[in-house]
Image: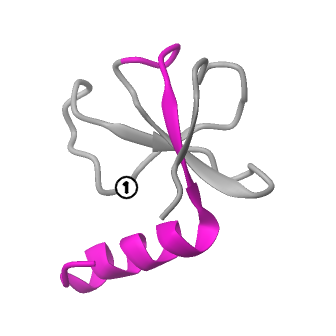
Amino acid sequence: MTEHSTPVASAPTGWRRSTFSGPEADSCVEVLDAHPSHVPVRDSKRPHGPALAFPRGSWGAFTAAVKDGTPP
């Protein structure tokens, strides 16, 4: 799988907190659904830090496995 990253994750707007993140403010993952080709993912503690950008198909397979409780 090819991974991409963006060095400044705060530039795009529209980030949302993952529903699978815990209620603690310091253990959250945020995703950006509106990106045209990838799904950027960042640590909410570092909104200005880097974000990983996964291909949509890979991200979809990962989230489906998490919802099903099966390892990807």
Magenta-tinted stretch: 46-72
Whether 38 is drawn above or below 58: the answer is above
Q: Position of residue 1 (x, y in %)?
A: 47, 65
Q: Is residue 20 magenta?
A: no
Q: How is the image coloured?
A: one colour
> Is 19 situated left or right of 37 in this image?
left
8 or 19: nearer the eye?
Answer: 8
Whether 19 is drawn above or below 30: the answer is below
Q: Position of residue 49 (x, y in %)?
A: 47, 17
Q: Amino acid at mark 1?
A: Thr
Please give the residue where the numbered disc 1 appears in the rendered image. 19
Hey, which quadrant is residue 40 in on the image? Answer: top right
Residue drawn where x is 51% and y is 50% of the image: 3
Q: Position of residue 60 (x, y in %)?
A: 51, 74
41 or 5: nearer the eye?
Answer: 5
Residue drawn where x is 19% and y is 79% of the image: 71
Hey, which quadrant is residue 68 in on the image? Answer: bottom left
Residue drawn where x is 28% and y is 47% of the image: 21
Q: Furthest-right residue in view?
A: 36
Q: Position of residue 24 (x, y in %)?
A: 19, 31
Image quarter (top left, top right, bottom left or bottom right) of the C terminus: bottom left
- Mark 1 surroundings: few (<14), some (14-19) or many (≥20) residues within 10 A: few
Whether 10 is drawn above or below 36: the answer is above
> Is 23 situated left or right of 43 in this image?
left
Q: Secondary structure at mark 1?
A: loop
47 or 57: nearer the eye?
Answer: 57
